[in-house]
Image (cartoon, rainbow, N blue to C red):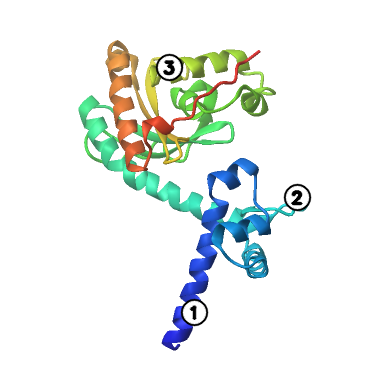
Amino acid sequence: MTDSSSASRGHGLRRDIDLLEALASDEAQNAGGLGVVRLAQLVGREKTQVSRALKALAAEGIVERDPDTLEYRLGWRLFSLVARTSESRLVRVAEPVMHTLSADLEETSHLCVLSDREVLTLLSVSGHSFRVHGWEGRGVPAWRLSAGRMLLADATPDELYVRFGTTGEMPVQELWSLIQDARRQGYARVSEEFEEGLVGVSAPVRDFRGRVVAAINISAPKARLGDRLDEAGRTTARAAARVSSLLGWEPRRTPQVRARLT
């Protein structure tokens, strides 16, 4: 490959990245997509060039075109790649923080994510500087756990109804109230709600956009942790904030939930 052809391909890649950055802009996100004319204006290119580039990216799933509005937005394949990378990075960033947290509290910590209606544990770390695997990969109904309440912290009432309104196991009104209490406190706590004799606290981990992407949980027998749940909650919240910071989150970006349950 000649230097000139390499430079040409690099320039083409740079142009494609410019288009992707335009589609990731606040303007594109708020509008739900952008048309060829507007994208050409944003990247300073001819409409025909932009149109050809977008068609090629759409063919690979990197962008997608709305069949009704004919506007483009970021595609499923790009989000799939980002999701897999983000989860790997989340575990990598969280693990050393969880080791410190578990050592401070002398309890096992868990890194949890939301999977449909369940809480899934990605990583567990004991208070003795090694990983434990009893919970990893197990799914538990979200409404039964403090981690579930924190993972649902950004949910609207309508989203809660869609997820849980047909289960009948937890009234949505009650779940909404518990989630809002946890948001105000900065951590959620449960006492023997999941299992007799077991208590726990959880705090949210946010990504660079301010969205809750995970929760750090501490669970232990009530006889051992019950008298210091709030202390453990505050400590866990500080650890979760540390992981959030490493993921690029700044507190001022945290979204505010304005919806109310009626």
Lateral position of residue 10 relative to residue 60, left or right: left
Residue 50, given in percent of the width and then of the height, sits at 63, 66
Lateral position of residue 131 relative to residue 18, left or right: left
Query: Do the residues under discs 2 and 3 have CB atoms within 8 angstroms?
Result: no
In the rendered image, which residue does mark 3 sit on? Answer: 184
Local crowd size for mark 3, using a 10 Å CA cut-off: few (<14), some (14–19), many (≥20): few
**Tag 1 or tag 3, which sits nearer the N-term?**
1
Residue 160, given in percent of the width and then of the height, sits at 62, 25
- The front one of 58 and 253 is 253
Per the image, label 2 sits on a secondary structure element best described as loop
**Tag 3 or tag 2, which sits nearer the N-term?**
2
Query: Do the residues under discs 3 and 1 have CB atoms within 8 angstroms?
Result: no
Question: Could you tell me which residue is drawn at 45 percent across and 85 percent down?
Answer: 4
In the rendered image, which residue does mark 1 sit on? Answer: 8
In whole angstroms, how far apart are the C-alphas of marks 3 and 1?
53 Å
Query: Do the residues under discs 2 and 1 have CB atoms within 8 angstroms?
Result: no
Residue 36, given in percent of the width and then of the height, sits at 67, 59
Compared to residue 200, the image places residue 15 above or below, namely below
In whole angstroms, how far apart are the C-alphas of marks 2 and 1?
33 Å
Q: Give residue 94's quadrant in the image.
A: top left
Question: Could you tell me which residue is drawn at 30 percent across and 21 percent down?
Answer: 234
Q: Quadrant of the C terminus?
A: top right
Q: Which mark is residue 69?
A: 2
In whole angstroms, how far apart are the C-alphas of marks 2 and 3?
40 Å
Local crowd size for mark 2, using a 10 Å CA cut-off: few (<14), some (14–19), many (≥20): few
**Tag 1 or tag 2, which sits nearer the N-term?**
1
- The front one of 208 and 40 is 40
Per the image, label 3 sits on a secondary structure element best described as helix
Amino acid marked by disc 2? Thr
Question: Could you tell me which residue is drawn at 49 percent across and 79 percent down?
Answer: 8
